[in-house]
Image (spheres, helix red, strand yellow):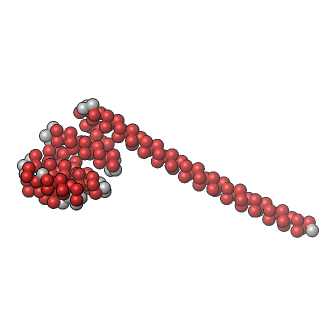
Amino acid sequence: MYKNFKEKFFLYIKKANTIVYFIIFLFIIIVSIMMYKFYVYKKNSQLIESFKNIFNKIKTNKFNSLINMKNFFKKNKNIYGTLIGLNLAKLYDSQKKYPYALKILFNLLTFTKDEILVDLIKLRISILYLKQNKIILAKNMQDSINQEFWKKILNEYQYLY
């Protein structure tokens, strides 16, 4: 009887240890997931704050933010980088530095995945080509636009060129 009790006791301890180990393992996994989510949240909030800061500088026409915009654009190949890139190209366009604006817009085409944004970028490239009197390149860029509503707008204003 003592031997049977001893075996049951050790079996009970073994089960209890297994349950404790499982709970500890589960706790470690949950804490790891929470830490990762917090890291991603913090990184995204920093990205958004940086984007808002640069955008506010653009609104106040501080051209010294050009370096900050370039650095942000180089680091972030996402929607925020795309929006900053479009504004950076617009800034170069207003300064009549068309090759720089075209370089940025072509760079945007390489990583932008949204079709509407891609067509908007192509439209901006087409406008820059028209400003440089490169009509054939502008027409080729306009022909590569895929969205139907952009094509309707282009057909309405076709008499301009």
Quarter occupied by the N terminus: bottom right
Residue 102 on image: x %, y %? 18, 49
Left or right: where 135 falls relative to 68: left
Tell me which corner region of the image, top left, top right, bottom left or bottom right, holds residue 61.
Answer: top left
Evaluate whether residue 42 shows in this view. Answer: yes
Residue 45 on image: x %, y %? 43, 42
Which residue is pictured at 27% across the width and 52% down the height?
Answer: 117
- Tally of numbered discs: 0
In the depicted structure, whether residue 9 falls above or below residue 35: below
In the depicted structure, whether residue 69 falls above or below residue 21: above
Left or right: where 80 falls relative to 30: left
State the residue in front, 61 or 27: 61
Left or right: where 47 falls relative to 105: right
Residue 12 on image: x %, y %? 80, 62
Which residue is pictured at 54% across the width and 48% down the height?
Answer: 35
Which residue is pictured at 9% across the width and 47% down the height?
Answer: 132
Which residue is pictured at 71% across the width and 61% down the height?
Answer: 18
Residue 69 on image: x %, y %? 28, 40
